[in-house]
Image: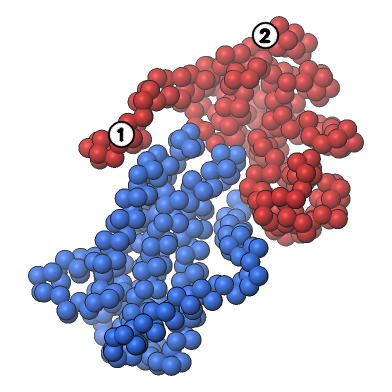
Chain colours: A red, B blue
Amino acid sequence: MEPVIQVKNLSKSFVIPHQRHDSLVEYLSHPSRIFKPSGEKFTVLKDIDLDVYPGDFLGIMGRNGSGKSTLLKILAGIYSPTSGSVKVKGKMVPFLELGVGFNSELSGRENVFLNGIILGLSRSFLQEKYNEIVAFAELEKFMDMPLKNYSSGMQVRLAFSIAIMADADIYILDEVLAVGDIEFQKKCFNIFREYKKRKKTIILVTHSSASVRDFCNRAVFLKDGRLHFYDSIDGVIKAYEVG
Amino acid sequence: MFNYIELLQEFIKTDFKLRYKNSVLGILWIILKPLATFSVIYTVWSNIMTMDGNYKMELLLGIMLMSFFNEGVLMGLGSLLAKSNVILKIKFPREVVVVSAVTISLIDFILNMIVFGIFCISTPVTVTGLSFLLFLLAVFTMYILIMALSLFLSVIFVKLKDIHNLTEVMLQLLFWATPIYYKLEMLPENLQKYVLLNPLTTIVMSARKGMVTGDIVVASDFKNLAIVTAVCLVVLLIGIRFFKKRIPKLAEYF
């Protein structure tokens, strides 16, 4: 089977500027320096090789600062690799954060369209699905209220309800499982099971061993920028728990 | 593939919605604000200085064009940074952000032109089909020029914040290097050459000829403007290349 995501020899480093010499005169004397930062090189991801196949539910575990978010951002096409390559086949929707573009001054309704269109959904599709989104979020009474008056739980519910409308082949989820109360969490988990049933490819980044055990058919452990593979999911969870 | 146009519309709509949120008069401000501004200018120039009607309308149009330029460049400059929260979370064609900022300033200009139309009731202007075409070409050239500059400035601004102050100073300089409050003919001849090198001079003078002065528009008017349009298009192409080259790595610098 052909992998839908193919990561080869991927490395990513950032430059941490030692001292900021942002002085205009200095830049003007060497204009190209604006885009060539000097400083200490900090390698976040080292030689990552990863193949993800259609229908995989891949869990990525790792401590804070291990490079998970950077890896996801590269997969999502937000950062570009320093070296190596990333190939993605099919439509991908990254949920690196819920409610991208949400504006607190706008009403819930306006935010549905703003966020949905940023996610790549069409206006007509959103109009069609609007009632479904509101019903799933359980926010029927609040849609004309500005978002700033929503509780954080309500905001996340709305964001999540829009996000699941995005129809893609590959989903990237970053720690979004732990949203809302128990009832809403259950609904979310049902959606993930549904994705799994429909053979969608999902990459899930989480700290929760239980979620990995429940959903994933594969898992990897990211430590200090390197990917570690184990024979079983339990092996990964063990490695993560040991550190 | 990506819903380019809808995203553009949504960004523009959001901007206008936010601008007039929590204000009693709301959307009316779109017209009221330029109306108030231009009333001031109009009154001042009618009473303090005795000038012919044409001059007042030329002045109004000149100021409208320059505020189109100023706002467009400054909004374009800040556009990428202003949308960093979205840019860092999802992949979409980044140029939409710049295009929406510049287009918002174009829409503002068009709304200002409605106000200009209101002033035309008391001070009529002469417009023919051909002269209106010249005016449209001038506005188009302005839009292209703002877009071209914004593509450079927005990227540089992410890395180098000084560019904002520098741009503001340059805008001031350009304003006075463009015949808005004075006429080109008032300048000494050797200075006129330099002022004509400023593309805004040709744009403003063409727009005035098209909309206000009532002078007969001839082929050379189009030729002079077309040269500036062509130059702006070339700068735009270079801007697009610069933008495309720099944008993949830009997310890391926010």
Chain bearing mark 1: A
**Residue B95 in view in this figure:** no
Q: Position of residue B124 (x, y in %)?
A: 40, 93
Mark 2 secondary-structure assignment: loop
> Which mark is on residue A243?
2
Q: Residue A113 in the image: x percent, y percent?
A: 70, 55
The residue closer to the viewer here, A88 or B140, is: B140
Residue type at mark 1: give it: Arg
Number of disc labels: 2
Horizontal and vertical percent for residue A188? 83, 36
| Vertical relation: B167 (above or below) B107 | above
Residue B82: image tag: none
Chain containing mark 2: A
Residue placed under numbered mark 1 in the picture: A33
Residue name at image x 48 percent, y 86 percent: B118
Q: Please, is residue A9 above or below residue A234 in the view?
A: below
Residue at image x 57%, y 59%? B15
Observer-nearest of A69 and A10 = A69
Toward the right, the furthest residue is A183
